[in-house]
Amino acid sequence: MRIRFKPWARQELEESSFYILEPEKIKGKWRKKFKNSNKELHLELGCGKGQFISNLAIKHPDINYIAIDLVDAMLGLTKRNIESVYKENNCEVNNVLITRFDIERIPMILDEKDKIDRIYINFCNPWPKGKHRKKRLTHTRQLEKYKQFLKSGAQVFFKTDDDDLFNSSLGYFEEAGFEIINKTYDLHTETIFENNMTEHEKMFSEQGIKIKALVAKLK
């Protein structure tokens, strides 16, 4: 998703209590950054404007969340969306952390000590050209990186509008040692998990495009 430069974003992020400026410095220590006793830790890769993570986290105060994106403007909007949702519910933001980082290099900021229970990947870039497919967030190469910080039995929740990406991802997960425990080619008529809508999902659904989804478990 392309987005215009937001001149205010960087300063607001750096002043935020739930933004991590230098994530490399807390590799293996993410759980200690939350000031609560929650046991579960979930991760969203490519959080966009934050609609998904803000609505999910407020519903589950007993779970901690990390949301990552590469663009300051996106994260600035994520930060504002999280603050808005929590303010509406008269809650303090204490179970969400956001940070800016390149997901292709994610082992630089997370390792086995972080023990991630679940990953969310929503409407990532499908990279349709063959030479670019290794950039897909669900590609086998990427999944092998995630395994470095996932707990045994951890799950990945994946949603997309792209048929080729979805069908290819089924193979990627199996190749990387994950078990597909649930899947659907039309999430809005066949619910396989608690679904929180993203900005992309709403747009695609209004265009009549069916949403594909799966849940994969690390063996």
Image: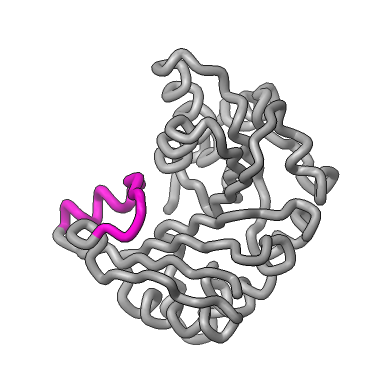
| Pick the front one: 217 or 14 | 217
Please indicate whether residue 90 sits to the left or right of residue 196 in the image: right
| Pick the front one: 60 or 163 | 60
The image shows residue 61, relative to residue 175, as above or below, that is: above
Magenta stretch contains residue 18: no
- Whole-percent x and y of residue 150? 67, 62
Magenta stretch contains residue 206: yes
Quarter of the image that includes the C terminus: bottom right
Q: Residue at x 56, y 86 (%)?
A: 175
Q: Residue at x 30, y 52 (%)?
A: 201
- Whole-percent x and y of residue 79? 54, 30
Q: Quadrant of residue 29?
A: top right
The image shows residue 60, relative to residue 41, as above or below, that is: above
Numbered label tally: 0
Q: Residue at x 25, y 50 (%)?
A: 203
The image shows residue 146, relative to residue 25, as above or below, that is: below
Which residue is most to the top? 90
Q: Which residues are magenta?
A: 191-207
Q: Residue at x 32, y 60 (%)?
A: 192
The image shows residue 36, relative to residue 25, as above or below, that is: above
Please indicate whether residue 20 sits to the left or right of residue 5 in the image: right
- Whole-percent x and y of residue 44? 54, 50
